[in-house]
Each structure stands twice: as C-alpha cells, then as structure tokens.
Amino acid sequence: SGRSIVAMASAQGVAPSNGGFIADKLTSMGSAVKGLGTLSGVFLPTVQNITGVLLFLRLPWITGQAGILLSLAIVACSVGTTIPTALSMSAIATNGRIPAGGPYYVVSRNLGAPFGAAIGFLFYLGTSLAATMYVLGAVEAFQVGFGLTNMFPMDRELIAIGVMFVLALIVYVGVEWVSRTMYLFLGIVVCSIILGIGGLAAYASGASFGTVDEVDLSTSGPLWTSTFTPDPATGITPSFQSLIAIFFPSVTGIMAGSNR
C-alpha cells in the first residue's frame, strides 16, 4: 500500500521534503513490489518466444532442404548473432531499472534520440510482422493438424484476424493477464515438444502410428548434405541465405524479457 511504501522510504532515510527524490524513490520501490521476477518476467517469456511456430512448422522443412550439417550451421549463425545482443541487454538491464519502453528505452538512452527513433521504428515493424507470422503459423498448424483446411475462402486469414483480436484484448487488459496466459500457452508448447520427441523415438524403434507417404519414405534416412528442391506450395527452390532469413526470427525472442 501507499502508507507502507512511505514508511519504508522513511526508514531508509528519505525525507518527505525531498520532493523529486522521494517521488523517484517511491516509484522505484513500487515497481519493485509489483515486479514479475526473473522467472515470470524474463526467462519464461524468452523461452516461449524462442520455442515458437518456426520450431514446429519450418525447422523440419529447413532440415529436409539444407541437411543436418547446414541446418546446424544456420542455427549456429543465428545464435551467434543474438548472443552478443543478449549479453549487452543483460549488462544494461542489471545495472539499473528499465522504465516503460523496454528495448526502445535502452537503445535511445545509449545511442541517442536519432538512432533510438530509427531503431525503435524498425523494432516496432519487426514486432508487428512477427506477431502476424506467429498467428498465421498457429492457425496453419491447427488446420493441418485437425484436417480443417479449405473450410471457406480465405479461411486461414480470417481465422488469424479473429485470433489476433483475442490476443489484442488480452494485451489491452494488462501485462499481468499476459503473464497469466503465458503459463497455459507455454505448457501447451512443452507438451507438444515432449510428444514430438516421443513420436520420433517410437518411429525409430519401429512402432507405426498412422501412414507415411511415398515422398517421405523416399527421403528417409540421415540427410547430412543439402537436397535443395522446389517447394511444392510455391515452386521456389530455397538457398542457404533464404533459409537463414526464414529461421532467424525464431532466435529474436530475447527481447521479450525487457518488455515486461
């Protein structure tokens, strides 16, 4: 409560007459009381963003096109690019309190307003496009998994708009509700990963669940080298650079912790 915070400030030697200083002190102490903590505010949101739709829909396709060795190189290049950013963000975030604005505040205060405005605008566009990609990917996974494709014209896009509206309502209510729903969605992702690993282990041991088409049987076995072939949906043959561009958004979830 407000009285308890004032009492704590008085106990620490903050005089009521120090107007600006006590205001800053009360604000920082109030934020500390309402903080989400390292686990709920940083670790789990980052894990949730990294284990996104690209892990389920595009990484197997990338492995089939690039092979195991080039896929590992793609992951290494992407992770190697984001590790210095994560270390820099951690150093800045642990040396002070980040007010509203998250990454934009950090960039603008360290590089200046011109660079902060330019990078902040690009960060806003990137986050908006990433949200669109994740929603469309979630709808695609749901339709393909349950056999609900081609229900009506532009079904995927219209369903994605509805899902985006629901997510916007959750965000509008507040960060607290976002954190509450995070546990549900992260639990679903973890269960999916466990079931996927169990399915691979069962298939490797000879157990059969369902049918496997001839295309998958013809390409069975370890794919160490690349086998770039035209995509059946688009007819475009991918390259190493294009596969990096497709996979790289999956490692950009490190900024999620600084947004809470």
Image: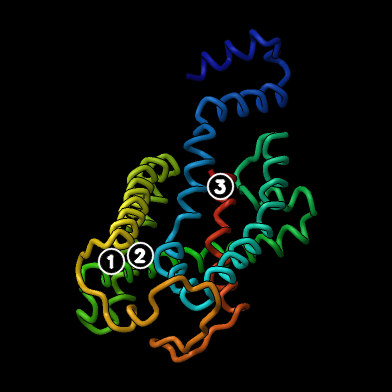
Q: Earlier in the sequence, mark 3 or mark 2?
A: 2
- Residue displayed at 72% across by 40% down: 91
Q: Which mark is residue 259?
A: 3
Q: Residues within 10 Å of mark 3 (few under 14, many from 20)?
A: some
| Amino acid under disc 3 | Asn
Callouts 3 and 1 close, C-beta under 8 Å: no
Residue receiving disc 2? 138
Is disc 2 placed on a helix, strand or loop? helix
Looking at the image, is 11 positioned above or below residue 186? Answer: above
Rendered location of residue 99, percent (x, y): 63, 40
Q: From this viewpoint, which residue is outermost toward the front?
A: 206
Place of residue 182 in the rendered image (x, y in percent of width and height, measured from the top left) = 39, 45
Q: CA distance from mark 3 to mark 1?
A: 28 Å
Q: Which residue, as the protein is rendered here, is positioned at the far top? A: 11
Residue at position x 60%, y 44% in the image: 100
- Residue at the image point whose x is 26% and y is 71% from the top: 143
Q: Amino acid at mark 2?
A: Ala
- Which residue type does callout 1 highlight? Phe
